[in-house]
Amino acid sequence: MKSNQTNRRSGHLGSITRLAVATALALGVPGSIVAASADTAPSEELRQMLPESVRDAGTLNVAISLAYPPMEYSDAGSTDLKGADIDLAKEVAARLGLKINFQNVDFSQLITSVTTGRSDMIWTAFSDLTTRQEQLDFIDYFKTGNKIFAPVAYQDSIKTVQDLCGKTVSVATGTSWVGFMESLSKETCDASAQMNLLQIGTLGEQLMQLKQDRAQAVMMGFEGVLDLQKQQPDQFYTIGDLYDPGNYGIAFAKESTQLREAVKATLDAMKADGAYTDILDRYGLKGAAVESFTVNAGK
């Protein structure tokens, strides 16, 4: 799943500065080569697991889709990338002795970026789904689920998921959330009062739709909702349960088995020495840590 980001300001929904500005900045930069973690020494044992082509190139090309705090984002006025995915990927690259090139692409183009060889992997809050496994292999690394949220102005009139029947719910274009909400609407609402699904590219745009009352609620990953509520306290509330729990996965082309295993071994080492959990905890996401890294465990 995914979306965008936000800073706080006064007003009905607060501002959309971190969301809109960061997205505009990031989308103007096709690639961002950065040094890996300066505090981490490369492991020669892990480096030897890499495909020779990647090891010789010295750079790991990682496709991301900005912006979706707290997973990947940049603050207003800055192009410096932040987030749990960013920090995890940088740590992996450092242990493999590689620089890292973050390639920001539209979410709908992520799979193509890997299957055509433009990127080595996708690492950007990307759900491991069996339908995607037809083209990709995944390392599952992060527990997630879907949440619906709405502005507090609707708290008296929209209390349950049933109250969304006949209303407009926004979902990010091209994500698995679209199909989930279509199914939820059919299961919950009468045929004459289905939810109207409004597909929007970024969370910044979704928040604007809420502000203008063109949508009454939004669905996205629970980690994004937590970050939004942290950035704009007392502005939003959640509706219903944690839906469709699953995992985000790091995605590779089917033929990239050697690279996938090198990354998985690196993550295993990070879990063993605590670096994996420490990075998630940095963003308040310790509870999303997986017990072990699995391959293609999505549903």
Image (cartoon, grey):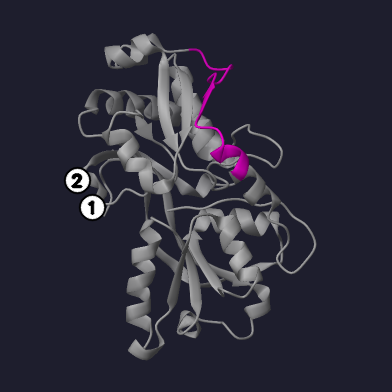
What secondary structure is marked by label 1?
Answer: loop
Give left or right: position of 120 versus 234: left
Between 16 and 225, which is closer to the camera in this rendering? 16
3D distance between C-alphas at marks 1 and 2: 6 Å
Lateral position of residue 227 relative to residue 199, left or right: right
Q: x, y percentage for residue 289? A: 45, 44
Queried whether the magenta region covers residue 31, the answer comes back as yes
Q: Secondary structure at mark 2?
A: helix
The residue depicted at 57 percent of the width and 38 percent of the height is 26
Q: Which residues are magenta?
A: 24-41
What residue do we see at 49% from left, 55% from top?
Answer: 201
> Decide: marks 1, 2 in contact (CB < 8 A)?
yes
Does residue 154 appear in this view?
yes
Task: Judge by depth and name the residue closer to the eye, 233 or 151.
Answer: 151
Q: Which residue is mark 2?
A: 134
- The verdict on residue 51 being magenta is no
Is residue 249 visible from the viewing direction of this image?
no
| The C terminus - image quarter | bottom left
Residue 275 position in % (x across, y down): 51, 29
Task: Give the vertical position of 198 relative to 57 (above or below).
Answer: below
Is 163 placed above or below 292 here?
Answer: below
- Say which residue appears at 69% left-offset and 67% top-offset: 235
The residue under label 1 is 131
What amino acid is found at the position of numbered circle 2 in the picture?
Answer: Glu
Q: How many marks?
A: 2
Rendering quarter of residue 192: bottom left
Query: Dot 1: within a 10 Å radius of its alpha carbon, few (fewer than 14), some, or many (20 or more) residues?
Result: few
> Which residue is at 60% across, 86% downward?
157
